């Protein structure tokens, strides 16, 4: 956590952490560096830098995962519980881009048409059958259609990795779960979404899979 601003024309800045509903605590290890600070009638701007992994238990590592940022702004330079506050989910770092030749693959669409109930959040599951491919293929990428999710950009696997499909020469079935957010509990909402799956007959050197350990489920 960083707290800073400009007081009497001079910048102030420090590395903090929080342990609960109380005033932030100054870190023993000050890992953020203030590069510049400026202020005008409407904005205060701080430019800061830090290594991705500080090896400090009071810091969170910066990586390619989605990070939840919280912020608070005060009308004065006193460190109080500010009323102007909020949160945002962001990707601080851009994930490495895998070079990919789209002409080397075919696409398969999974489309979902849903009439949403008037609930604030819904997890909607649908089952889908793969096309009748005549030979084994590798799934090499995915793309969201008509929707958005945090970190939901097109996913292209590394050039030497593919997910096996149609190994037994028969169609396979997939379960697609979509999370719908309806905070105002609106009714009679019709929504179209889905994903586009890229496959290729040029099999990759390595095959990827998924294993879930300790997954809790219920029967009956």
Image (cartoon, rainbow, N blue to C red):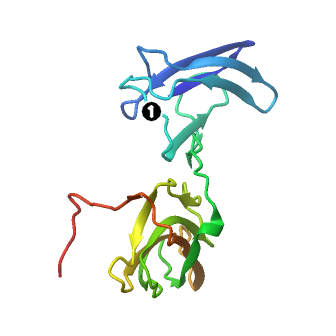
Dot 1: few (<14), some (14–19), or many (≥20) neighbours within 10 Å?
some
Vertical placement of residue 130 versus 159, above or below? below
Residue sitting at x 23%, y 62%: 215
Q: Which residue is mark 1?
A: 61
Quadrant position of residue 213 = bottom left
Vertical placement of residue 149 versus 55, above or below? below
Residue 54, position as x, y percentages in the image: 44, 23
Q: In this view of the protein, which residue sits in the foreground, 107 or 118?
A: 107
Label count reads: 1
Quadrant position of residue 55 = top left
Name the secondary structure under disc 1. loop
Identity of the residue furthest to the left in this view? 220
Q: Along the horizontal axis of the image, is 92 left or right of 162?
A: right
Q: Along the horizontal axis of the image, is 181 left or right of 102?
A: left
Whether residue 122 can be seen here: no
Q: In this view of the protein, which residue sits in the foreground, 69 or 211?
A: 211
Residue 201, position as x, y percentages in the image: 50, 72
Whether residue 201 can be seen here: yes
Residue 70, position as x, y percentages in the image: 53, 40
The quadrant of the picture occupied by the C terminus is: bottom left
Residue sitting at x 47%, y 75%: 119
Residue sitting at x 43%, y 75%: 176
Residue sitting at x 49%, y 34%: 62
């Amino acid at each position: 956590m960083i707290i800073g601003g400009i007081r009497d024309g001079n910048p102030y800045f420090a590395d903090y952490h929080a342990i609960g509903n109380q005033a932030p605590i100054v870190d023993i290890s000050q890992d953020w560096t203030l590069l510049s600070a400026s202020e005008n009638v409407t904005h205060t701007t701080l430019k800061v830098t830090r290594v991705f992994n500080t090896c400090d238990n009071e810091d969170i590592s910066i990586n390619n995962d989605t990070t939840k940022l919280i912020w608070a702004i005060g009308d004065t330079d006193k460190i109080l519980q500010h009323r102007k506050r909020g949160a945002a989910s962001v990707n601080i770092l851009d994930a490495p881009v895998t070079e990919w030749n789209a002409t080397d693959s075919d696409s398969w669409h999974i489309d979902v048409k849903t009439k949403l109930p008037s609930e604030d959040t819904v997890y909607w599951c649908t089952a889908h059958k793969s096309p009748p491919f005549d030979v084994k293929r590798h799934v090499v990428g995915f793309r969201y259609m008509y929707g958005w999710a945090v970190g939901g950009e097109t996913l292209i696997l590394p050039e030497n990795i593919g997910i096996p499909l149609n190994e037994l020469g028969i169609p396979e079935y997939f379960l697609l779960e979509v999370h719908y957010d309806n905070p105002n509990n609106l009714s009679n909402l019709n929504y179209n979404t889905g994903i586009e799956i890229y496959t290729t007959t040029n099999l990759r050197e390595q095959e990827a899979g998924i294993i879930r350990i300790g997954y809790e489920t219920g029967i009956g």
